[in-house]
């Protein structure tokens, strides 16, 4: 019976244990929500960067006009970069461009997951599509749902997102998987709370409210509105 486990933060990732496992990375506010939205609106590839310097070095490899740089560090917009949140990013022309994207947590989690052959980027926006694909394609493999967390700590919104992913698996194949206690706890949270209210109660959600960015949280709180499935290949995300 394949197992489903939830890691509470990216710091729990162990490269030596990723071989043979399917990894689904979440950063609901906002890295994976932004990545998913960028793909939905025509971005061709997303290159997750470990930090600002990594992103700038990567940009030097690409011709002017072929890419967008975007990102944040410790929730602050990086000077000279595009915005890190989904709706704000869409104010730029993204169609048919690469996105070089650096964030404090989500893009780092994606990079740290690269020891696995199968790494997906998921959010509430596309979670149902990703989990449906995982169920159909990786029938007998262990699934690790990775909460990126925040600054080395647990965060509510990613754990809520993990619960949505677990619930999708449980509803589709309740007797096929063995769910860890962390996976079951995340599902309990998901089933007990409204998506928007759960996200707004989180630390990042409260900061967004104070910054008059509740609309970004509201957008990221939508369940299953996109069918895009971003998968990492040699460290670069592309659509299946």
Image (tube, helix red, strand yellow):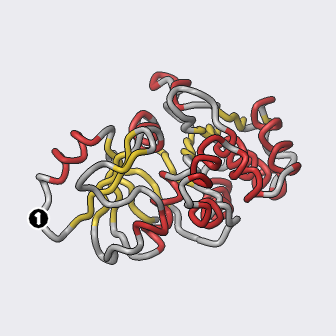
Q: Is residue 126 visible?
A: no
Q: Secondary structure at mark 1?
A: loop
Q: Position of residue 174 (x, y in %)?
A: 86, 49
Compared to residue 213, the image places residue 113 above or below, namely above
Residue in the foreground of this view, choosing between 70 and 225: 70
For mark 1, does the 10 Å Cα neighbourhood hold few (<14), some (14 to 19), or many (20 or more) residues?
few
The residue sitting at 56% across, 24% down in the picture is: 12
Compared to residue 2, the image places residue 239 above or below, namely below
41 horizontally vs 173: left or right: left
Q: Position of residue 192 (x, y in %)?
A: 88, 49
The residue sitting at 46% across, 59% down in the picture is: 85
193 horizontally vs 121: left or right: right
Residue in the foreground of this view, choosing between 102 and 45: 102
- Name the residue tied to disc 1: 63
Q: Position of residue 96 (x, y in %)?
A: 30, 76
Compared to residue 96, the image places residue 154 above or below, namely above
The residue sitting at 84% across, 51% down in the picture is: 193
The residue sitting at 42% across, 33% down in the picture is: 112
Could you tell me which quadrant the N terminus lies in?
top right
215 horizontally vs 120: left or right: right
Q: Position of residue 134 (x, y in %)?
A: 62, 54
Q: Is residue 125 visible?
A: yes
Compared to residue 171, the image places residue 239 above or below, namely below
Which of the 4 image quarters holds residue 127? bottom right
Residue in the foreground of this view, choosing between 139 and 215: 215
């Amino acid at each position: 019976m394949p197992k489903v486990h939830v890691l509470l933060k990216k710091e729990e990732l162990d490269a030596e244990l990723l071989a043979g496992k399917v990894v689904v990375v979440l950063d609901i506010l906002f890295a994976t929500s932004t990545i998913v939205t960028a793909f939905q609106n025509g971005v061709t590839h997303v290159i997750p960067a470990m930090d600002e310097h990594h992103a700038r070095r990567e940009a030097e490899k690409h011709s002017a006009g072929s890419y967008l740089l975007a990102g944040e560090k410790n929730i602050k917009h990086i000077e000279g970069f595009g915005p890190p949140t989904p709706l704000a990013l869409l104010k730029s022309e993204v169609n048919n461009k690469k996105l070089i994207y650096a964030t404090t947590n989500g893009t780092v989690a994606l990079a740290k997951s690269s020891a696995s052959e199968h790494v997906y980027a998921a959010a509430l926006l596309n979670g149902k599509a990703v989990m449906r694909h995982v169920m159909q394609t990786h029938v007998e493999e262990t699934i690790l749902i990775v909460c990126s967390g925040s600054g080395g700590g647990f965060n509510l919104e990613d754990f809520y997102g993990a619960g949505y992913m677990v619930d999708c698996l449980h509803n589709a194949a309740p007797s096929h998987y063995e769910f860890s206690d962390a996976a079951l706890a995340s599902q309990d949270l998901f089933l007990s709370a409204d998506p928007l209210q759960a996200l707004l109660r989180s630390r990042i959600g409260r900061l967004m409210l104070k910054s008059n960015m509740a609309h970004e949280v509201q957008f990221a709180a939508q369940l299953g509105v996109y069918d895009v499935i971003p998968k990492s290949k040699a460290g670069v995300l592309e659509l299946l």
